[in-house]
Image: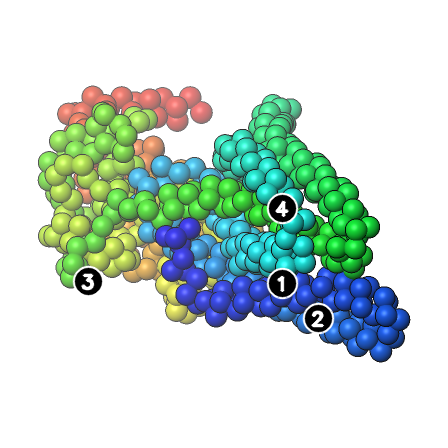
């Protein structure tokens, strides 16, 4: 928690006021039992109505002040606690945005969501409790003890048994509860993982009629979460009857010994009533502290998970004074080797390749030949393990990352659109793009032919993930979005797989005639999509098997020839 304290800076005034106001509330609460004893032992004993009324008014004023101080303290505590959590959440979100693909591979999506929501909320709650309950409990106990000893020092010795016994009970339960709360947070991760996976792929689940299987999988993790939560809560709930037993036993002891002192004339009835009230306040303070420690355990578990994200250094680092302009769209791979974090085997091996600016390159190969991995090194979605990737004649590590990625447009295999309008989605490519620029990009990507048919045109609503568009439409929209960046390099990673061959041919023509100044890299499964390329790279088992144009590869590359023949047979059989 100390590591996270700097994020409280913006709310420090509320963090200071909340405990101060809480101490004032405690002082007002502490004075009330004493005033009550005066009413009994002085006012009622002497039948002094004026004294009773005056003291009663003071009690009412003290109660009102306690209420006001309590409300103000709660408000300041909430502002500080949840403001603190919001600052941490924003920092974690920004940290995640800076992660490389390698960093994102380390955390599951559901775990990151849980950390941004559940864990940050827990930290906010614990912070609020730290400013209020963690202040109220010790001050209430200290002030109540002082008042109890001032009323009857001999009777106050009962605390010498009650307090150590209460601390012992609380300590034992905290030790047992801590690992359960840590398991609870992990269980939430797992449940969120099932929910996220199921809802993301709900159409696949329904198409394969796997609802029963998914329900069983969810039930298993949900039941584990329930059982873990019940164990944790049951351990905490066990604390309440034990503390109540201590409280009532202490009150009985005080009534017994205090009653004897009243009979002997050593103690007034009002003093006994106020003494019992102070006993209750002391032991209730201990109960509040125990509850706070329970929540604090959850807070420390959540803080640890938050710090795990914040302390994760991005695999992608920028040098001092990075280059902020790409000279051209040329690309070179120099003795490149790459392996994923945690893997012992190289995914890419001995890659040497030079691509001229404005050249159109096709990449093809069998499944798991590392085609996508190769192109992901260009915009530094991953960094090479050995060797160097050069863009515009300079190592990609020398560029400002934002500049590099603005000039290297990447259309991923998985086409993602965001909720909003078509116009909103297109402006991901260029924030200030005019409608004319957007329409031009849509025409290049062969998307305007269906967008123009909507009554609301560019204002047509896009559901989350683009679920109200077909696969081919989504692919064309994402290509248009990438073209709006006016990049020097565009990478299409199997981005036309859902497009019919006629539309694919139109796209090829646009890239060949209208966008020939852009270095274009096309990863494809269909040879027809890359047949027109200046050169075609054939990948096999993480290495470049052959490079050449379509005709030469048919003669020199067994892998290319096999792919071509299998696709030709497929076409003829149709």
- Upstream in the sequence, badge 1 or badge 3? 1
Can you identify the residue that label 2 sits on? 62
Q: Nearer the viewer, mark 4 or mark 1?
A: 4
In the rendered structure, are the residues bearing label 2 and label 3 in contact, judged by CB atoms less than 8 Å apart?
no
Across and down, in percent, residue 561 comes to 24, 24
Front residue of 7/563: it is: 7
Across and down, in percent, residue 55 comes to 78, 73
Crowd around label 2: few <14 · some 14–19 · many ≥20 (10 Å)? many
Q: CA distance from mark 3 to mark 4?
A: 75 Å
Crowd around label 1: few <14 · some 14–19 · many ≥20 (10 Å)? many
Residue for point 49% across, 64% down: 15
Can you identify the residue that label 4 sits on? 157
The numbered disc on residue 324 is 3
Front residue of 469/150: it is: 150
Q: Nearer the viewer, mark 2 or mark 3?
A: 2
- Upstream in the sequence, badge 3 or badge 4? 4
Query: As drawn, is 493 to the left or to the right of 339?
Result: right
Crowd around label 4: few <14 · some 14–19 · many ≥20 (10 Å)? few
Can you identify the residue that label 1 sits on? 26
Q: CA distance from mark 1 to mark 2?
A: 10 Å
Q: Nearer the viewer, mark 3 or mark 4?
A: 4
Front residue of 383/30: it is: 30
Q: CA distance from mark 4 to mark 2?
A: 29 Å
Residue for point 59% across, 30% down: 228
Q: Is residue 414 above or below residue 59?
A: above
Residue for point 85% across, 78% down: 50
Q: Secondary structure at mark 3?
A: loop
In which quadrant will I find the C terminus? top left
Q: Secondary structure at mark 2?
A: helix
Across and down, in percent, residue 302 comes to 47, 44
């Amino acid at each position: 928690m100390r590591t996270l304290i700097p994020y409280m800076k913006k709310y420090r005034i509320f963090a200071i006021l909340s405990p101060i106001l809480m101490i004032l509330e405690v002082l007002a609460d502490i004075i009330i039992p004493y005033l009550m004893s005066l009413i009994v032992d002085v006012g009622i004993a002497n039948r002094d109505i004026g004294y009773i009324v005056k003291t009663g008014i003071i009690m009412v004023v003290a109660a009102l002040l306690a209420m006001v101080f309590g409300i103000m303290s709660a408000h300041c505590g909430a502002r500080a606690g949840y403001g603190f959590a919001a600052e941490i959440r924003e920092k974690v979100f920004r940290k995640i945005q800076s992660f490389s693909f390698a960093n994102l591979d380390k955390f599951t999506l559901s775990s990151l969501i849980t950390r941004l929501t559940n864990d940050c909320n827990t930290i906010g709650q614990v912070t609020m409790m730290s400013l209020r309950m963690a202040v109220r409990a010790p001050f209430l106990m200290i002030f109540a003890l002082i008042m109890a000893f001032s009323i009857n020092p001999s009777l106050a010795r009962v605390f010498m048994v009650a307090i150590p016994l209460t601390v012992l009970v609380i300590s034992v339960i905290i030790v047992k509860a801590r690992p359960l709360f840590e398991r609870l947070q992990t269980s939430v991760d797992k449940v969120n993982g099932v929910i996220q996976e199921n809802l993301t792929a709900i159409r696949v689940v329904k198409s394969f009629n796997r609802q029963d299987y998914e329900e069983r999988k969810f039930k298993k993790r949900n039941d584990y979460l329930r059982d873990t939560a019940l164990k944790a809560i049951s351990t905490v709930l066990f604390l309440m009857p034990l503390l109540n037993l201590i409280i009532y036993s202490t009150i009985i002891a005080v009534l017994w010994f205090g009653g004897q002192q009243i009979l002997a004339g050593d103690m007034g009835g009002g003093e006994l009533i106020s003494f019992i009230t102070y006993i209750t306040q002391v032991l209730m303070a201990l109960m509040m502290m125990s509850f706070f420690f329970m929540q604090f355990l959850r807070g420390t578990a959540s803080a640890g998970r938050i710090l795990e994200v914040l302390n994760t250094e991005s695999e992608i680092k920028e040098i001092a004074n990075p280059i902020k302009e790409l000279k051209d769209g040329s690309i070179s791979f120099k003795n490149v080797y790459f392996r994923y974090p945690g893997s012992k085997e190289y995914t890419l091996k001995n890659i040497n390749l030079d691509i001229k600016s404005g050249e159109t390159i096709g990449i093809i190969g069998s499944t798991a030949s590392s085609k996508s991995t190769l192109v992901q090194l260009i915009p530094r979605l991953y960094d090479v393990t050995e060797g160097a990737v050069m863009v515009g004649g300079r190592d990609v590590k020398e560029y400002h990352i934002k500049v590099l990625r603005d000039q290297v447009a990447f259309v991923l295999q998985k086409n993602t659109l965001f909720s909003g309008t078509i116009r909103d989605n297109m402006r991901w490519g260029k924030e200030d793009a005019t409608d004319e620029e957007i329409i031009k990009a849509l025409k290049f990507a062969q998307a305007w032919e269906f967008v123009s048919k909507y009554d609301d045109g560019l204002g047509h609503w896009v559901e989350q993930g683009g679920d109200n568009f077909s696969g081919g439409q989504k692919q064309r929209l994402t290509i248009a979005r990438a073209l709006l960046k006016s990049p020097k390099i565009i990478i299409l990673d199997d981005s036309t797989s859902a497009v019919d061959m006629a539309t694919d041919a139109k796209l090829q023509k646009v890239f060949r005639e209208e966008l020939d100044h852009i270095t274009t890299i096309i990863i494809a499964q269909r040879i027809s999509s890359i047949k027109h390329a200046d050169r075609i790279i054939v990948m096999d088992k993480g290495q470049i098997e052959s490079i050449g144009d379509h005709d030469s590869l048919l003669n020199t590359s067994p892998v290319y020839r096999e792919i071509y023949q299998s696709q030709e047979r497929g076409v003829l059989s149709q």
